[in-house]
C-alpha cells in the first residue's frame, strides 16, 4: 500500500491536489477551517493542480496527522459542494420557510424605509412594463 | 526577508493589498506583480517574529479572499 | 392507435438503507421505514419484487415503489416538517450565572455566589420579555436557567408576572419551566412555583455517591437535597389533584466516565424517586467539561454499551409494570413509529438554533441557542446575534441564523444525505464548531453522530426483533400527552 501523499518539510505539511477532484471552493472551505492553528498557503503549481502548505503555529504538532485531517476535511468540503449544488432548491426552500417564518412580516417602519424605486431585476422582454409604456398607446 | 507568493487564480489582489496594509506596522514590505502571482517580500521589524507575521498575513489574505467571493 | 401505458411497478422509488442486525432497514423522504430480511432487500434493490405479493403491497403502501405518492406520504412529510415555519417557541433566560453547586462537567460556566454582577436585573428582564413576546410562534415556553435560577428568585417572579400581564393583549400559549439543582428550594418558593404553574426540571446523576462526587455543595449532600425536593414537589402535585403519571419533576442525567459501569444503579435510582423518564445524555464539550474532559469523557462506543444495558434493563422493568421511559428513545420512536416530530430542538432537521429557540444572557446579550451562549462564556462569541436592543426581525434575519439553518439541513450534509436515519435525525452546528472547527463538521468523526446513529441502530434492532412486550413499551413511549395544567394563557 502506498504512503499517504503528504510531504513533510520545514515544519510544514504539503499536499498536491487534483483540481478535477477538489474544486477551489472545497479547497477554500477546508483551508479556512485550519487557519486558527496553521498558516495556510494555497498555490497553483501547474494547470489542473493545487498545492496546499500547512505550517503549524505551535511546536510539536504531528504534521502527518495534520495533513491527513486536512485531506478528510477537503473531501467533506468537496462532497458538500456537490450536494448543495444538487439539492440547492430544497435547501433554499427550507431555509426561506424557516427564516421567513421566524422573522414574520415586516413592520410598518421597515416598509417605510424600503426603497421601492430600486430596479429589482433585468427585464429584457419588457414583461414588467405597462401596456401604455410598451405600446405607447392607451 | 520572507517571500510570499499568492497565485492570482487563488487570491484576490485587493485582499493581498488589504492584508499588507493591516500588517504595515510590523514589517517593511515590497510588492511585486508577476504574470501569475502577487509577490510580497517582507522584512519584519522583529526578526524573531518574521515567520509568524508572514504566516498571519497569508491567512489574512486568504480570509479576505474567501469573504469577498460572490460580492 | 393508442397503446396503454405500462408502468413497471417493481422499480424502486427514492430510498436509503442500512444493515441493522440480521435485517436491512430502508427509509424514504416521508420517513416511512421497513425492516427487510436480506433476501427481501436483495429483491427490492434489484427491482424484482413481484406484483401481487405481500412484500410488493407493503412497499407500495409505504411509497417505496415508483408511482404516484399517496396521501399517506404527503401527510407524513407535512407532519415531519410542521415545525419549520412557526418561529422560535423556546426562550431560555439566564437569570444569573451564580450557583451554589460545583459540577465537574458544568456546561454553563457558573459563577461564584458573590458574583452579583451576573444577575439579570428586573429592568433588563422586562426588555427580555418584551422581545420574547414578539416571536412569531403562537406557543412560547420561557425556560429559567443559570447558574442556579433560585439564586435570583425575585427576578424569576418578576418575569412571570410581567410576561403574563403583557400576554393578556397578545394571547400566546405561554408556559414556564425552570432548570434547578433544588438545593435552595424552600416551602415558600415551592408554594409560589406550584401556584404559578412553573414546570420544574432538575439533575440526578444516579445513586448518592456518584451524584455527590460530581455535583458538590459546600455543606450538604446535593443528592439528598435534590431527592428530598423531587419527592416533595411530586407530593405537592398529587395534593393538587394532578395525575402523577403526567405531572412530576423531570430529571436529567449527565453521563460521565464514572457513570458508565453503574447503568443499573442509575435506572434504579430514578425508579425509586418515582421518575417516569430518564434522559441518558452524554457529556457535552461546553463549559467546564472542556477542561475536565480527561476525567469525564469517554469513547462513544463505551457510551453505547452503557446505553444499551440501561435501556435493556428499562425494557425489562416496563414488562414488569414499572413505567419508565428513556427520553432519546422516545424522541426517535415518536418520529419512527408515530410519524410525528416532537420538535426536540437538538434533534431535528434543520436544528432549532435561532428559528426554534433563542437564549438571552443575564447581560441582555442574545444568542442562537443555549450552546451558543455557553460558548460565549468560554470566550467564543460566534453565535452572538445581538442584544436586547436589537430589533426582533434583525435577530431572526441574522446571517448566523441563516448559516446554522443551512448547516443543520441534513440534505446539505455529507454522510447525512445518504444515511438511512436522515428522516429522524439532527445535527448540532455549535457542537460541530466546538469539536471540529466548522459549523458543518464531519459526521464520521462526530461524537454526536455516533450517539444518534448508535441509538437508532439499537432501536431498529429491537423493532426488527418484534418482541410484543418491547413493541408495546415502545408504542407507550411515543404517546404524547399534553400537560395543559402548565399553560398560563390560551391563545385567543
Image: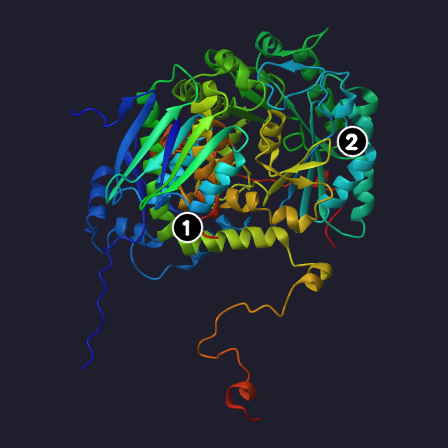
The residue located at (38%, 17%) in the rendering is A61
Task: Nearest to the eye among marks 1 and 2: give it.
Answer: 2
User: Badge 2 is on which residue?
Assistant: C156
Question: Relative to C383, does residue C378 appear above or below in the rendering?
Answer: above
The residue located at (19%, 48%) in the rendering is C46
Q: Nearer the viewer, residue A119 or C418?
A: A119
**Label 1 secondary element:** loop
> With C200 as the anchor, is C122 left or right in this view?
right
Q: Quadrant of the C terminus of chain C?
A: bottom right
The percent coordinates of residue C76 (x first, y second) are 46, 52
Question: Relative to C114, does residue C403 appear above or below in the rendering?
Answer: below
Q: Nearer the viewer, residue C15 or B68?
A: B68
Identify the image's colour scheme: rainbow, by chain, secondary structure or one colour. Answer: rainbow
Q: Quadrant of the N terminus of chain C?
A: bottom left
Q: Nearer the viewer, residue C483 or C359?
A: C359
The percent coordinates of residue C333 (x first, y second) are 46, 37
Q: Residue furthest bottom?
A: A137
Q: Chain of mark 1?
A: C
The percent coordinates of residue C140 (x first, y second) are 68, 44
Query: In which image quadrant can residue C18 be found?
Result: top left
Which label sits on residue C30?
1
Real-space CA distance between mark 1 and mark 2, rounded to the nearest whole angstrom: 42 Å
Question: Relative to B41, does residue C40 appear above or below in the rendering?
Answer: below
Badges 1 and 2: C-beta atoms under 8 Å apart? no
Which label sits on residue A16?
none
Q: Chain of mark 2?
A: C
Amino acid at each position: 500500500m502506498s504512503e499517504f501523499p503528504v510531504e513533510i518539510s520545514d515544519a510544514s505539511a504539503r499536499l498536491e491536489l487534483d483540481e478535477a477532484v477538489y474544486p477551489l471552493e472545497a479547497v477554500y472551505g477546508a483551508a479556512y477551517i485550519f487557519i486558527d492553528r496553521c498558516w495556510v498557503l494555497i498555490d497553483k503549481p501547474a494547470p489542473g493542480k493545487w498545492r496546499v502548505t500547512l505550517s503549524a503555529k505551535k511546536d510539536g504538532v504531528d504534521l502527518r496527522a495534520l495533513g491527513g485531517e486536512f485531506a478528510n476535511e477537503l473531501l467533506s468540503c468537496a462532497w458538500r459542494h456537490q450536494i448543495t449544488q444538487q439539492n440547492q432548491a430544497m435547501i433554499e426552500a427550507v431555509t426561506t420557510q424557516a427564516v421567513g417564518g421566524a422573522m414574520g412580516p415586516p413592520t410598518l417602519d421597515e416598509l417605510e424605509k424600503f426603497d421601492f424605486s430600486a430596479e429589482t431585476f433585468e427585464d429584457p422582454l419588457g414583461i414588467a412594463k405597462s401596456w401604455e409604456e410598451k405600446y405607447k398607446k392607451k | 526577508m520572507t517571500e510570499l507568493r499568492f497565485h492570482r487564480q487563488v487570491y484576490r489582489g485587493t485582499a493581498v493589498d488589504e492584508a499588507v496594509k493591516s500588517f504595515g506596522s510590523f514589517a517593511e514590505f515590497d510588492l511585486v506583480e508577476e504574470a501569475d502571482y502577487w509577490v510580497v517580500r517582507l522584512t519584519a521589524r522583529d526578526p524573531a517574529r518574521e515567520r509568524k507575521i508572514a504566516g498571519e498575513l497569508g491567512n489574512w489574505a486568504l480570509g479576505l479572499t474567501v469573504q469577498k467571493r460572490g460580492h | 392507435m393508442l397503446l396503454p401505458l405500462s408502468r413497471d411497478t417493481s422499480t424502486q422509488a427514492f430510498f436509503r438503507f442500512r444493515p441493522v442486525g440480521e435485517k436491512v432497514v430502508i427509509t424514504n423522504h416521508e420517513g416511512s421505514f421497513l425492516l427487510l430480511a436480506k433476501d427481501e432487500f436483495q429483491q427490492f434493490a434489484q427491482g424484482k419484487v413481484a406484483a401481487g405479493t405481500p412484500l410488493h403491497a407493503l412497499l407500495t403502501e409505504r411509497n417505496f415503489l415508483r408511482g404516484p405518492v399517496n396521501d399517506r406520504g404527503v401527510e407524513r412529510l407535512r407532519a415531519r416538517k410542521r415545525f419549520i415555519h412557526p418561529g422560535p417557541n423556546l426562550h431560555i433566560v439566564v437569570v444569573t450565572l451564580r450557583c451554589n453547586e460545583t459540577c465537574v462537567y458544568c456546561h454553563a460556566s457558573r459563577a461564584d455566589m458573590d458574583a452579583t454582577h451576573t444577575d439579570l436585573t428586573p429592568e433588563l428582564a422586562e426588555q427580555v420579555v418584551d422581545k420574547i413576546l414578539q416571536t412569531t410562534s403562537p406557543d412560547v415556553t420561557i425556560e429559567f436557567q443559570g447558574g442556579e435560577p433560585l439564586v435570583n428568585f425575585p427576578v424569576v417572579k418578576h418575569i412571570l408576572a410581567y410576561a403574563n400581564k403583557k400576554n393578556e393583549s397578545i394571547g400566546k400559549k405561554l408556559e414556564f419551566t425552570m432548570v434547578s439543582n433544588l438545593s435552595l428550594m424552600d416551602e415558600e418558593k415551592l408554594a409560589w412555583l406550584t401556584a404559578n404553574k412553573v414546570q420544574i426540571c432538575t439533575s440526578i446523576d444516579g445513586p448518592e455517591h456518584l451524584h455527590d462526587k460530581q455535583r458538590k455543595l459546600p455543606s450538604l449532600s446535593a443528592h439528598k437535597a435534590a431527592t428530598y425536593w423531587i419527592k416533595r414537589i411530586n407530593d405537592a402535585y398529587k395534593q393538587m389533584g394532578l395525575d402523577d403519571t403526567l405531572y412530576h419533576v423531570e430529571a436529567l442525567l449527565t453521563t460521565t466516565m464514572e457513570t458508565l459501569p453503574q447503568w443499573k444503579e442509575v435506572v434504579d435510582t430514578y425508579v425509586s424517586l418515582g421518575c417516569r423518564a430518564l434522559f441518558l445524555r452524554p457529556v457535552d464539550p461546553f463549559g467546564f467539561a472542556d477542561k475536565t474532559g480527561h476525567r469525564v469523557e469517554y469513547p462513544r462506543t463505551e457510551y453505547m454499551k452503557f446505553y444499551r444495558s440501561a435501556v435493556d434493563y428499562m425494557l425489562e422493568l416496563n414488562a414488569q409494570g414499572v413505567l419508565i421511559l428513556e427520553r432519546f428513545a422516545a424522541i426517535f420512536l415518536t418520529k419512527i413509529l408515530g410519524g410525528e416530530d416532537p420538535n426536540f430542538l437538538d434533534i431535528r432537521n434543520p436544528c432549532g438554533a435561532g428559528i426554534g429557540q433563542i437564549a438571552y444572557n443575564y447581560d441582555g446579550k442574545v444568542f442562537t441557542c443555549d450552546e451558543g451562549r455557553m460558548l460565549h462564556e468560554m470566550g467564543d462569541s460566534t453565535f452572538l446575534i445581538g442584544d436586547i436592543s436589537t430589533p426582533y426581525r434583525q435577530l431572526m434575519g441574522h446571517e448566523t441564523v441563516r448559516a446554522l439553518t443551512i448547516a443543520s439541513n441534513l440534505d446539505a450534509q455529507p454522510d447525512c444525505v445518504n444515511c438511512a436515519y436522515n428522516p429522524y435525525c439532527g445535527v448540532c452546528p455549535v457542537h460541530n464548531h466546538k469539536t471540529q472547527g466548522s459549523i458543518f463538521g464531519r459526521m464520521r468523526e462526530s461524537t454526536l453522530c455516533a450517539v444518534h446513529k448508535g441509538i437508532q441502530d439499537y432501536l431498529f434492532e429491537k423493532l426488527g426483533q418484534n418482541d410484543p412486550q418491547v413493541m408495546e413499551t415502545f408504542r407507550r413511549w411515543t404517546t404524547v400527552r399534553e400537560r395543559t395544567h402548565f399553560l398560563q394563557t390560551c391563545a385567543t
